[in-house]
Image: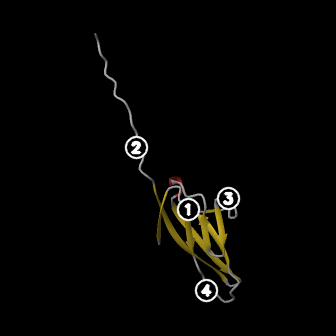
Amino acid sequence: MVAVTTENESLTLNMTARANPADITYSWYRGVEKLVLGSSRFRQDAGVLTVTSGLRRAEAGVYTCEASNAEGSTTHDINIDVHCKRTFFSYARFADMHI
């Protein structure tokens, strides 16, 4: 699965697992690093991950949702592609003039 967002825009990922027993715990990872949820940037409500202040280009990559209960766990990967807005640079050309 691929999710596309624009740099500095918020993003919501919604993952739902069905299991028996239904007491499911969700964890989110970027690569092998577990995300610090409940921070000012990453919020979680069950399988819903919200990035409130927007992703940066450097944060693009594979994110993994892990759903687990007493019987075991399963994971699902999401490749997040962060597009950046166009940036224009202006510069002045200077010419050497000899008078």
Considering only order in the chain, which callout, 2 or 4, is on the residue closer to the N terminus?
4
Along the viewing direction, whichever of 41 and 36 lies nearer the viewer: 41
Rendered residue at 61%/69% (across/down): 49
How far apart are labels 4 and 3 at the CA level? 29 Å
Q: Residue at x 51, y 59 (%)?
A: 60
Give residue 6's position: percent from left, percent from top.
Answer: 47, 59
Residue 88 lies left or right of residue 52; in this view the side is: left
Could you say which disc has been placed on residue 18 in the image?
A: 4
Q: CA distance from mark 4 to mark 2?
A: 48 Å
Circle 4: residue type: Arg
Residues packed near mark 3 inside 10 Å, few (<14), some (14 to 19) or many (20 plus): few
Which label belongs to residue 88? Answer: 2
Q: Mark 4 or mark 3: which comes first in sequence? A: 4
- What amino acid is found at the position of numbered circle 3 in the picture? Ser
Q: Is residue 13 above or below residue 23?
A: above
- For the residue carrying disc 2, how many other residues have a C-alpha within 10 Å: few (<14), some (14-19), or many (20+)? few
Pointer 3 residue: 40
Between 91 and 58, the residue placed more toward the observer is 91
Tell me the kind of residue under disc 1: Ser
